[in-house]
Each structure stands twice: as C-alpha cells, then as structure tokens.
Amino acid sequence: NSLRRFIRWAPKAELHVHVEGTLEPEMMMRFAERNGIPPPYPSVQAARAAYNFTDLEHFLQIFYAGCAVLRTRDDFYELAMAYFRRAATSRVIHAEVSFDPQTHLSNGVEFDTFMGGLVDAAMDAEEQWAITVSYIMCFRRDMPLESAEVALRLALPWRHRIVAVGLDSSELRRPPRDFASLFDRAAALGFKRTAHVGEEGSPEYIWQALQLLHVDRLDHGTHCLDDPRLMAALNASRVPLTICPISDLQLKVYDGQLQERLGQLIHSGLMVTVNSDAAAYFGSYLAGNYEWLSTAVGLDVRQAARLVANGFQAAFSLPEGQRRRM
Ligand code: ADE
Ligand code: ZN
C-alpha cells in the first residue's frame, strides 16, 4: 500500500541507534571466533532465542554480553559498515549513531581502536552510499562517574566526528542530576547533549535532564505523558524526543498500553522522531519501526511524512559533514 511504499522510499534520518545494538548474532559468532573469545551463545539460534526480554535491565545484561566480542579496529569497522549498508538500503540518508566508550574501555579496548574503526566506517559509508554520519558518545549511568570523565578526555582528539554526548544504561535509581557537571564540561567543549530519560523512569528524570543537563534532545522520553505540565513545556520548547517503538514493545515498557500511549504521544503535537535503538536485539530496523508504529497508532502518509521530516529537523549535524580521517 502507499503508506508502506512511502516509508520504504522516503529519505530518512535516524537519530537514536546504538552501533553495538546492530550486532547481529551471525557477526557476534564470527567476531567471537576470530578473537578467541567464548561466544555468549552456542549458536545463532540460541542467541535469538535468548532475546526475549522481561525489561530494560534484562536487555542490558544481554546487550553488554554481546559487546564483549568487539575487540579490534576491524570489528568496529565491520559492525558500523554493516549498519550503514543496511541503512542506506532502506533510504536512511543521515545517521547519528551512539556508542558506549566505557563498555569497550572496560573490556580492555583502547579508545583509538574502537573510534578509529567507527570513524573509518563513517568515511567509507559517506563515500559509498552518500549517507552522512556523526557519532554520539553515551556515558553509562551504571558505571562510576570517573570512568565517564576518562572517556570524555579520550574523546577530545575525535571531536570532529562526535557531535554530542548522551547518557544511557540503567535508568531507575540513577538520577540525571548526578551527571550535571560532566554535561556542563561536555557543553563547554562544544558537544551537544542528549540523554536517555523517561524510558522506564519518571517525568522527574526528564525535568532533570532538561533543567540540569540542559539537553538539546531526549532519548525515549515517553514517560512525559505522565505529567501534563511537562508535556506543555516540551510542546513550547520543541525539544525533540527520539522514540523507539519496537524497543518499548520488546522491553515491555507500557505492558498492554503501549499502542494507546504512543498514539497519545504522536498526536500530542510534540517534536517526536522515530528510531530503532538496538535493532539487532529487537528484530527491527528503522523502516520496521515506522511500519509498526503506523499500524499501531493509525498513521496516514501525511502524518508519517511529518515524523520523517522531524528526523531532519531534530538532527544535530546535517550534510556539510566534516571529512577528516585520523
Ligand atoms: N543502551 C542501549 N540501548 C539502550 C536503551 N534502550 N536504554 C538504555 N540504554 C541503552
Ligand atoms: Zn537507546
């Protein structure tokens, strides 16, 4: 039908995708083998069978176990290239891709190793597929603040390719306020700011991200629905939300009420964008998220086009892109 055709063919931007979350089980097994690391699962089928999540916390355990196979510059290069190839095929022409430096540093991988692979992939993808790419460096909320500070320092030589800092991992009991001075420092260094908040957590965390971290975007943010005053503030400020419908579905964020809640959000007039989050674990890339959402909340082509346009409007960096290889 015409909506499906539109979604497939419209040039799209993706603003919330974790490169580590695009690690398909086949690639995970291959990297484990060539790096001499025991694979997290005995087979590709066993991996897929394990991707049946009870909540965010359960997903994160499985996600970080997968990250352990990523060791070499080639691993990061191939991982990112596979995502860009797929993205280009489904007409994603601009991607702002998150990565978790603390995960790799704590696995003993040097910053320049993973960053080198990611940046080479961005350069090659831009050349081969006319996609534009920038990176978002996410701090992990569940790790010591000092390790985030180390990551920020190591990122400085790569600033031309890292457009923003973010905040991810476990949300509950880890208030954004703990990261306020780190985010101030990042802003002073010229990074934009975003944070995963209101995914499982309450509107209070969204307020903190806005008022204490001074974020330019919110990742997820769907729990703003629980606070009418926050909804009004977001509507007035036009701060974008990068929602990830199939991620919420797979992480059982709203139980049986997800369709209804996302419907309210989409029709609320907030600046909402659609994204895939950790596509290899949730079984669906960007176009699949648009399709599922369209059916779930009953979008027509005009409404879908608005969401696609929001993706470009909410982008941190657009085409001019810097092209420098380290
Ligand atoms: N890291 C990767 N995906 C994430 C998510 N959905 N929430 C928090 N941290 C993440
Ligand atoms: Zn995410």
Image (cartoon, helix red, strand yellow):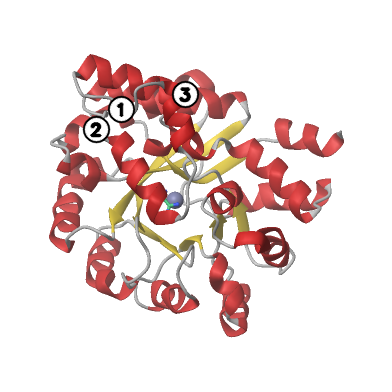
Q: Which residue is mark 1?
A: 76
Return the residue at label 3: 45
Image quarter (top left, top right, bottom left or bottom right) of the C terminus: top left
Q: Indicate which disc residue 114 carries.
A: 2
Q: Give residue 291's position: percent from left, percent from top.
A: 72, 41
Q: Position of residue 13 (x, y in %)?
A: 58, 42
At x 59%, y 34%, the residue is: 92
Q: Residue at x 49, y 76 (%)?
A: 203
Tell me: residue 320, above or below residue 137: above
Nearer-N-terminus badge (3/1): 3
Within-10-Å neighbours for mark 3: few <14, some 14–19, many 20+: few
Q: Amino acid at mark 1?
A: Phe
232 in relation to 72, above or below: below
Compare residues 293 and 139 and report the one nearer the observer. Answer: 293
Q: Please, what secondary structure does the residue beneath circle 1 have?
A: helix
Q: Position of residue 244 (x, y in %)?
A: 56, 51
Tell me whether the residue at label 1 lies in contact with that at label 2, contact meaning CB atoms closer than 8 angstroms: yes
**Residue 154 is at least partly visible in this image:** yes
* Spot occupied by residue 204 in the image (x, y as percentages of width and height): 44, 79
**Image point (28%, 65%), residue name:** 183
Whichever of callouts 2 and 3 sits on the residue coming sooner in the sequence is: 3
